[in-house]
Image (cartoon, grey):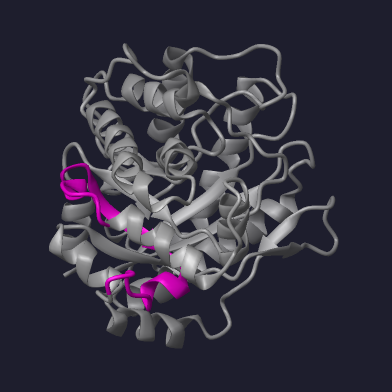
């Protein structure tokens, strides 16, 4: 079963729509277009995201927040059922967010292991077939050895528990964009983080062929003056994967992490200019949703145009997964930087 799920998610020309923002973060999105953070408004926005005709041509999986997993659309149809009908695998965010890591350099750790097995059993019954756990590593704050080990251990325990409950785990240690550091420093930290993560996953008997990864691309810090070209990002990122990621891992679904819509797509495209041992694709939230959200603006008459905007971005990243994307004709707003300092999800 898990093999079929991974084969679907890591299918050519498709990637993941990350729409698992917590209700608080979803509220910030809604506030940006003048809407209150109510369940009805969240439902309207999530309905918009899952119902564009043809979405399944480009999207293979959708990560949901717990509320969304149990939610129906404004027409009363279960969101999970709509996804499955389009050939999109429903997934679920299972971590419980970040809290301060005592004894560290103002760093964080991710909570949520308590009760995880029972929650995942319930999520499976509700239709989820994969899970996601996001923890973060901050370069300006070190990162300390304690923070890296805590991140890696938490991911490993989560992955083992998820596999035991029939869910494919997506492993996500996000290396935050915050900082003035160059691309070499990001590369150095990323190597350490992934080495620790795979070490502890092996300790926890995680089956590497039964996981998916959601890494950060190797880029300079957001405040670094020396920017990197897509080719440079691809070169460093692929070198990281070759050094740290076993070829038995079926899929690498990159996060966008505050890059602009176009930047995230260009970088992905550059990584797919030659064959890779893994399916190298996307698991984007803001880099798929930003223009869509602004186009909608909370107005029912704009739903069709907003869905077209979402499909446009999904198709662009589908082409990037195949190494066939070009940025010709992209709108100016798609190049808008979306970096947020100390971003929480």
Q: Is residue 112 visible?
A: yes
The residue nearer to you, when weighing 339 against 177, is 339
Q: Is residue 43 above or below residue 16?
A: below
Q: Indicate the position of residue 280 as horizontal and vertical percent values.
A: 30, 36
Q: Indicate the position of residue 343 as horizontal and vertical percent values.
A: 66, 47
Q: Which residue is drawn at the image coordinates 28% and 27% (left, top)?
A: 320
> Is residue 251 rendered magenta in the image?
no
Which segment is the magenta one? Answer: 51-75
Q: Indicate the position of residue 5 as horizontal and vertical percent values.
A: 20, 61
Q: Which residue is drawn at the image coordinates 37% and 44% (left, top)?
A: 302
The residue nearer to you, when weighing 126 against 202, is 126
Is residue 341 left or right of 160 when viewed as pictured? right
> Is residue 63 rendered magenta in the image?
yes
Q: Is residue 340 above or below residue 18?
A: above
Q: Is residue 208 visible?
A: no
**In the picture, residue 23 is in which quadrant?**
bottom right
């Amino acid at each position: 079963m898990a093999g079929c799920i991974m084969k679907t998610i890591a299918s050519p020309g498709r990637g993941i729509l990350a729409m698992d923002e917590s209700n608080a973060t979803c509220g910030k999105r809604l506030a940006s277009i003048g809407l209150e953070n109510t369940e009805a408004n969240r439902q309207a926005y999530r309905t918009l995201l899952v119902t564009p005709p043809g979405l399944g041509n480009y999207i293979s999986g959708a990560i949901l927040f717990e509320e969304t997993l149990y939610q129906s659309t404004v027409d009363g149809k279960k969101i999970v059922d709509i996804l499955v009908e389009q050939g999109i695998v429903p997934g679920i965010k299972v971590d419980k967010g970040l809290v301060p890591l005592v004894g560290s350099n103002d760093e964080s750790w991710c909570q949520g292991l308590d009760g995880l097995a029972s929650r995942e059993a319930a999520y499976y019954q509700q239709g989820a077939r994969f899970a996601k756990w996001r923890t973060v590593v901050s370069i300006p704050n070190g990162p300390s050895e304690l923070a890296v080990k805590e991140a890696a251990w938490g991911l490993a325990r989560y992955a083992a528990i998820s596999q035991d409950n029939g869910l494919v785990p997506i492993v996500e240690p996000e290396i935050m964009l915050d900082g003035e550091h160059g691309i070499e420093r990001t590369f150095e930290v990323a190597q350490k983080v992934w080495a620790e993560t795979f070490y502890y996953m092996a300790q926890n008997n995680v089956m590497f062929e039964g996981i998916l990864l959601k890494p950060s691309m190797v880029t300079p810090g957001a405040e670094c003056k020396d920017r990197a070209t897509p080719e440079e990002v691809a070169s460093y990122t692929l070198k990281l994967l070759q050094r740290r990621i076993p070829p038995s891992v079926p899929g690498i679904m990159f996060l966008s992490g505050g890059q602009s819509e176009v930047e995230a797509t260009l970088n992905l495209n550059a990584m797919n200019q030659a064959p890779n041992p893994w399916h190298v694709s996307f698991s984007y939230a803001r880099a798929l949703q930003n223009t869509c959200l602004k186009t909608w603006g909370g107005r029912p008459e704009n739903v069709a145009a907003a869905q077209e905007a979402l499909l446009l971005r999904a198709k662009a990243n589908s082409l990037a997964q195949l190494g066939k994307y070009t940025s010709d004709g992209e709108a100016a707003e798609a190049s808008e930087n979306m970096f947020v300092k100390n971003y929480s999800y």
